[in-house]
Amino acid sequence: MPPPKKNTSGTGGRRPPGGPGRGARPAGQGGKAGTGTGTGTGAVRGRGFAPRGAASAGPAKPKPAFAKPGPPMPSRAKVARATPTAEHPANPHPARAAAKGSKEPQRIAKLLARAGVASRREIERMIDYGRIALHGEVLTTPATLLTSLQGVTVDGKPVDAPEPTRLFLFHKPAGFITAERDPKGRPTIYDRLPDGLPRVMPIGRLDMNTEGLLLLTTDGEFKRQMELPSTGVERSYRARAHGTVSQAQLEDLAMGVEIEGIRYGRIDANLERRTGTNQWIEMTLTEGKNREVRRVLEYLGVEVNRLIRTRYGVFELTDLPIGQVYEVPQHDLVAFRKTLKKA
């Protein structure tokens, strides 16, 4: 998979560096910030949604926009296009095939995750707490096998049948934590997301002070698949770090590194450019351990003072305005899922 394109700017402000030569994000998102309406050929038309809550005090900011899928995106869009093969034949009726496969018994945690109730791990905790029942009987094990969610309740409420998986690209601002709620009262991404979205779960996490691309999905099972290192989904970042590090040091990271007893796998890193006392560094990894980029660069003797995630798998941030959301069209999502390794 090719590395993300380089930017040629990046100092100051909160918007990820962008400039001449940077690829455009999916067509139709080039309109005014907050409108969710495209202006070019193949534009994706959407509508603006008011934010759920004010992010901070101060002058009013443009409302985030949530663009619903529209016509197929042109080839420049940074999403997967799977070519049918003997291993992955084209399926003109994916919904019919999914319905047929749903007759096979599956663990209840997996079915509930598919329905967007929560992640599989969280559902297992909910079962431990006695919050999930089947035909009125509280379940005691996540190993329960079912062919559907008929008769299943969560906190006494029936669970709707799973709908098609949906995937959203969100340009997370710095200053928000990736959680639904915070005991310390800090702002979360759910305070910043626009109204009108379905219930979504973040794929992976970004630190409070990390900005950039955050994927959101309605499908807990898809979330798990995207997060597992075994699926090999790459994440790319641009880090601005204070201090000096050589290209040779960065290339050594391709062999992996152990820091304070924690083993970090292969990292492809390149020194992009220097700006004053800072250096811009591009890094691509597949594990995404907690604060991995910051800890690895600190180990090399530099301190990260700005971190931007630019890519997750084939999905790129490009010029998606900060705080806005874009929905990946179904045909592109289906094509991408065919390329994923089985978890």
Image (tube, grey):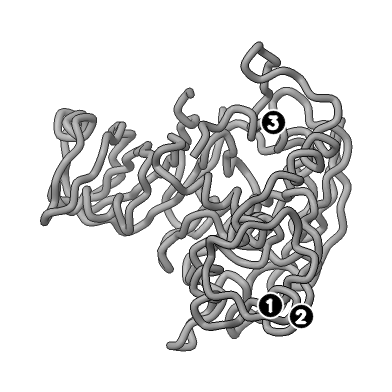
Q: Report helix, strand or loop for mark 2.
A: strand
Q: Where is residue 244 in the image (x, y as percent from the top left)?
A: 16, 44
Q: Is residue 280 above or below residue 109?
A: above
Q: Position of residue 96 (x, y in %)?
A: 85, 37
Q: Which of marks 2 and 3 is in front?
A: 2
Which of these two is toward me, 224 or 325? Answer: 224
Q: Report helix, strand or loop for mark 3.
A: loop
Question: Residue 322: in sight, yes or no?
Answer: no
From the image, tell me which residue sits under label 1: 154
Name the residue rendered at 73%, 23% in the picture. Answer: 75
Q: Is residue 180 above or below residue 257?
A: below
Q: Return the disc, 2 or 3, that comes first in the chain's sequence.
A: 3
From the image, tell me which residue sits under label 3: 77
Q: Are marks 2 and 1 in contact (CB under 8 Å)?
A: yes
Q: Report helix, strand or loop for mark 1.
A: strand
- Relative horizontal placement of residue 295, taking residue 22 as reference (left or right): left
Q: Distance between the residues labelled 3 and 1?
A: 39 Å
